[in-house]
Amino acid sequence: MTETAFRLTYSTMFDPPPQLHERFEAALAQVRARLGRDYPQWIAGRPRAGEHRFEVRSPIDRSWLLGRFVRGTPQDAANAVAAAAGAFRGWADTPWRERVRLLRRVAALIEQRVYEIGAAVALEVGKNRMESLGEVQETADLFTWYCDQMEANDGFDRRLPNDPLPGFVSRNRSVLKPYGVWAVIAPFNFPFALAGGPIAAALVAGNTVVFKTATDTSWSGWLLLEVLRDAGLPDGVVNYVTGAGGEVGAALLAEPQVAGVTFTGSYEVGMGIVRQFAQGAWPRPCIAEMGGKNAAIVSRHADLERAATGIVRSAFGLQGQKCSACSRVYVERPVAESLREKLVAKTRLIAVGDPTRRENWMGPVINEAAYLRYQKCAENLRRHGTVLTGGQTLDAGDLANGWFVAPTVATAPLDYRLWYEEKFIPLVLVAEVDSVAQAIDLANASDYGLTAGFYGADDEIPQFLDRIEAGVVYVNRPQGATTGAWPGYQPFGGWKASGTTGKAIGSFYYLPQYLREQSQTVVE
């Protein structure tokens, strides 16, 4: 993507140059020709087979076999951790500038393969081409960002004033050092970026890594492993395991040599890991990103066209399966009817279908569980609220073999549970309010606090920014009401039940979480 002046981010993806589509189409044809292969795990620098395998099929069409992957065992997890532990000392002792050099090579390889990997992500996750390419490019940028931060902080090695001791020279330093073996468990919705980003931070800090993506997106994990392998990282520094979270994932986290973990997924699983890592002989660091129930607020002074565009993009991008997706809208009563009309009109224009095709913006949900969850929510809304548009599963023609559903706009009483429960489906609820202040109170009345959006007049913005309880906020943004963070531009992290650290991905404060401080005093 470096051959043109175009710079792909989530904000610029809406008007790409023609050559982007041409290159994606060519890469897609190449990737399709290689579907259905067997893939190993990767432990101690070598492929690791297994007795049993599972299939990964595309949610676009379940007849498309993407690959067969090893059904990992607890012993595989133990072997991967042992390999990472054995490689730790050598990697930690590698000068940090050399680690940066190798990881910049990873970023460069990702960029070289961005179309091929993007095509695979589109087939596996069901993302449209721009979302898929955006995720892969974002991963390269995350590797670059954490390398930049390591350099900007001079390896996190700081000289402090000498002690004022007469007759002695007492030299002091503060040094941040790696923990050891770091586990990375990534979700299905951003399997490349939310594995690659934490891996980049852990590795540049000097930790070694064992990582696992969601079972539905094991192929993306393998493609990331290939990049790390081809960049020349030493054996055992990065290890890749596959299989069920309740088996190989749980076994990985139970290994006592795992010094820290980064998890992205549900609140229930994340909090279980937090509690697990707080117990034992000593507490271990746990970076858990755990979803959101994100609200957009629209005042009577808002540009309604801009608001409707931003809400639809955030509610239905990736089929509502982003932790930052907009699932709640609070609009002031005088403009509520007009906003609803615009939301319904824009939603009905969304092209749903095979997202690898240029004309389709919205693809399928990830699997049968999400499909059934959507059906149940739609049925309940018909009883307890009003479905303004959508609410149906889509199975006609080319959609018959995929998990396709209609983007849905609905209303419901403010005490209805869907205002508070994260469902990870293309559904947005709209409610009328009397004031911006009431809307902020309602937005904050959630256990989650990941993202939020506001549309209104300049003099209303400070109240929103001062009072909203969310880690990432956007104001008057048509590119996305609650979505679209990019490394170096919008750090991404949540408050309350959305995250455990208060530090954001791609921020100035994220990388030091993978390091621990040692105060050194040497008297000459």
Image (spheres, helix red, strand yellow):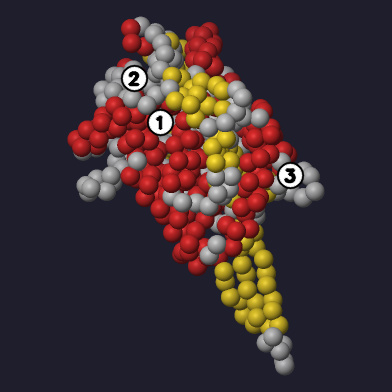
57 lies left or right of 26: right
Residue at point 49%, 35% (across, down)? 221
Residue density around tag 3, few if under 14, some if 14–19, many if 20 or more, within 10 Å: few
Tag of residue 402: none
Q: Residue extending furthest left?
A: 18
Q: Residue extending furthest bottom?
A: 167
Secondary structure under the numbered disc 2 in the rendered image: loop
Q: CA distance from mark 2 to mark 3?
A: 44 Å
Q: Depth-wise, is mark 2 or mark 3 nearer the camera?
A: 3
Going by the numbered disc 2, the residue's amino acid type is Asp
Q: CA distance from mark 2 to mark 1?
A: 13 Å
Going by the numbered disc 3, the residue's amino acid type is Pro
As rendered, which of 516 and 328 lies closer to the eye?
Answer: 516
Secondary structure under the numbered disc 3 in the rendered image: loop
From what the image shows, is residue 440 above or below residue 426? below
Q: CA distance from mark 3 to mark 1?
A: 33 Å
**Would you name the residue on which mark 2 appears?**
354
Q: Could you tell me residue 280's position as x and y percent? A: 79, 45
Q: Depth-wise, is mark 2 or mark 1 nearer the camera?
A: 1
Indicate the quadrant where residue 269 lies: top right
**Would you name the residue on which mark 1 appears?**
121
Residue at point 48%, 40% (across, down)? 225
From where the camera sits, is residue 354 visible?
yes
Indicate the quadrant where residue 422 lies: top right
Indicate the quadrant where residue 318 lies: top left
Going by the numbered disc 1, the residue's amino acid type is Val
Labels 2 and 1: the sequence-earlier one: 1
Looking at the rendered image, the quarter that the C terminus falls into is bottom right
